[in-house]
Image (tube, rainbow, N blue to C red):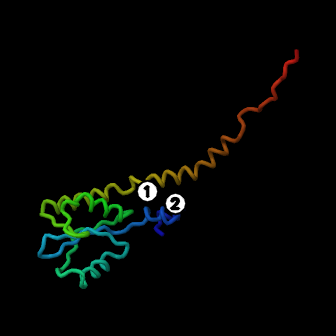
Amino acid sequence: MSKKAENADLGSPQVERFFKTDTVYLIHAKGTIRYKIGYTNRPFEQRLAELSSGQSPYPLIAIKTILVEDAHTIELGLHHKFSSFRYYGEWFEFTNHQLKEVCKAMDKATRHQGRGLSFLLMIAGLITLLCPLFLKQCQQPQFKATPAIQRTK
């Protein structure tokens, strides 16, 4: 579990997925215009070695990696954004201009970290911590209630 998730004490698997940082990567099949957009929760070097050992007839070169929360969602977003350039599966064919756009989109994804669900979970954690203090204060009567006086005819 990451330090953020431990500190937030919100350890459910669904919440942990959003706190965990994984790698989104862009690799190039040397000698082609083909690029793979993927993600891994293992060390990137291990994933690159795995892809290079028999899964590609071309030498693979890392172009860009980013360490992000909820990497799978970011990877899917990149796949969707650049779907018109999809060659097959997670492989795309990019010109130099399109490649720059992919790198910009990856940079943008790193700049937006902490603004989405992580930020909301931090706020929820603060509310959880502060709420008992406010509730305790709200439960203390500000005035004493007196029984209603009944009128007699």
Residue placed under numbered mark 1 in the picture: 118
Q: Position of residue 30 (x, y in %)?
A: 14, 76
Instruction: Tell me the SS state at disc 1.
Output: helix
Q: Nearer the viewer, residue 88 or 131?
A: 88
Q: Label 1 sits on what residue type?
A: Ser
Task: Name the outermost residue toward the right.
Answer: 153
Q: Where is residue 92 in the image (x, y as percent from the top left)?
A: 20, 67
Q: In this view, does 58 lie to the left or right of 135?
A: left
**Any mark on residue 107, and which?**
none
Q: How many labels does the image show?
A: 2
Q: Where is residue 126 in the image (x, y as percent from the top left)?
A: 53, 51
Mark 2–mark 1 Cα distance, whole angstroms, equals 10 Å
Task: Name the outermost residue toward the bottom.
Answer: 54
Q: Residue at x 66, y 40 (%)?
A: 138
Q: Nearer the viewer, residue 108 or 31?
A: 31
Q: Earlier in the sequence, mark 2 or mark 1?
A: 2
Q: Label 2 sits on what residue type?
A: Ala
Task: Name the outermost residue toward the front.
Answer: 88
Q: In this view, does 4 lie to the left or right of 93?
A: right
Q: Residue at x 34, y 76 (%)?
A: 43
Q: Where is residue 25 in the image (x, y as percent from the top left)?
A: 27, 69
> Vertically, is 38 above or below 145?
below
Q: How crowded is mark 2: few (under 14 residues within 10 Å), some or many (20 or more)?
A: some
Instruction: Tell me the SS state at disc 2.
Output: helix
Residue placed under numbered mark 2 in the picture: 8
Q: Which residue is drawn at 52% across and 64% down?
A: 12
Q: Which residue is drawn at 49% across and 51% down?
A: 123
